[in-house]
Amino acid sequence: MRQIALYGKGGIGKSTVGTNVAVALQNRGRKVMVVGCSPKVDSTASLLGGEPPTENILELSRIKGQDEDTVMQAVKKGYRDIYCAEAGGPEPAEGCAGRGSALALDLLKQYDIPNKLGVDFLVYDVIADVVCGGFSQPMRRGYANEVYIVLSGELMALYSANNICIAISELARTGANVGVAGLICNMRNMDFERDLVEEFAERIGIPVMAYVPRSPKVQEAEAQGGTVMEFFPESEQAKVYEEMAQNILNRAGQPTKIPRPVELEDIMGLMQKYEGALS
């Protein structure tokens, strides 16, 4: 079983990328499970008819106790029979969301849920505005050693991506088996965005695996409660997700890379360089 993690700042489009790629992988004969690691519990909504699951691992565990049946109850079958689960979060104003996600992942591993379901690909969708100890657990504990960072050419997206790189390089230094397989640029249609992201990628030593164009098909599909792969499978946007899934499959057995994070001043310099090109 391959375990991959999508990291990136909130709102960058990780869930859109993750769910569409999950469908593309499932279409290629792989059995896929998507695990949302965000207290918003909406990572898998577009695989479940547009609504977040009414049950998540942590909430059920609080109500019914921590056992295999309870964890399995939180696993739902979505579009194309993709398995979906949300880690959940603590009660409002109580506890740490990152630690909550870590506990949910521990329970999935403790009861060997993905293997019992025959999963080939386990996809973690992890919010990472702050790469705290809890949200780093998919990497720290070896649940996912193949990380894809979703970013754009916007300042905060680059800043978050660099923070993720700092966390990964530190985890690798302390012995964790983790690295970055590639960057995924979910484009915002900025001037010189591709050039900016390419230069950022070169500086941190990580290749850009895909450029995902901005497309109204994404919003149209989500308005219907699903993914581009479900409602517009012949579209150009769907082809981007298909190609991304194939690239991930082609990476089987290939090593990941340890990034070389840069300083904030370097990111600001990049932004100023390409903003200056407009004047």
Image (cartoon, helix red, strand yellow):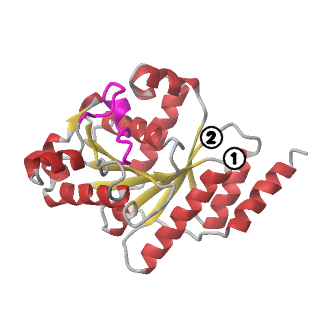
Q: Could one spot residue 275 in this view of the protein? A: yes
As displayed, is residue 191 above or below residue 223?
below
Q: Which mark is residue 187?
A: 2
Asked if marks 1 and 2 touch (Cβ < 8 Å), the reply is yes
Q: Quadrant of residue 3?
A: bottom left
Residue 243: horizontal and vertical position, in percent? Answer: 48, 39
Residues 176 and 134: in front is 134
Dot 2 crowding, Cα within 10 Å, few <14, some 14–19, many 20+: many
Dot 1 crowding, Cα within 10 Å, few <14, some 14–19, many 20+: some
Residues 103 and 270: in front is 103
Q: Amino acid at mark 2?
A: Met
Residue under the image location 37 percent in, 58 percent down:
98
Q: Which residues are magenta?
A: 37-54
Q: Secondary structure at mark 1?
A: helix
Quickly name the residue at label 1.
194
Asked if the magenta segment contains residue 148, the reply would be no
Residue 233: horizontal and vertical position, in percent? Answer: 44, 24
Q: Quadrant of the C terminus?
A: top right
Tell me which secondary structure the magenta stretch mostly adopts. Answer: loop
Q: Secondary structure at mark 2?
A: loop
Q: Amino acid at mark 1?
A: Arg
Residues 43 and 172: in front is 43
Disc nearest the viewer among 1 and 2:
2
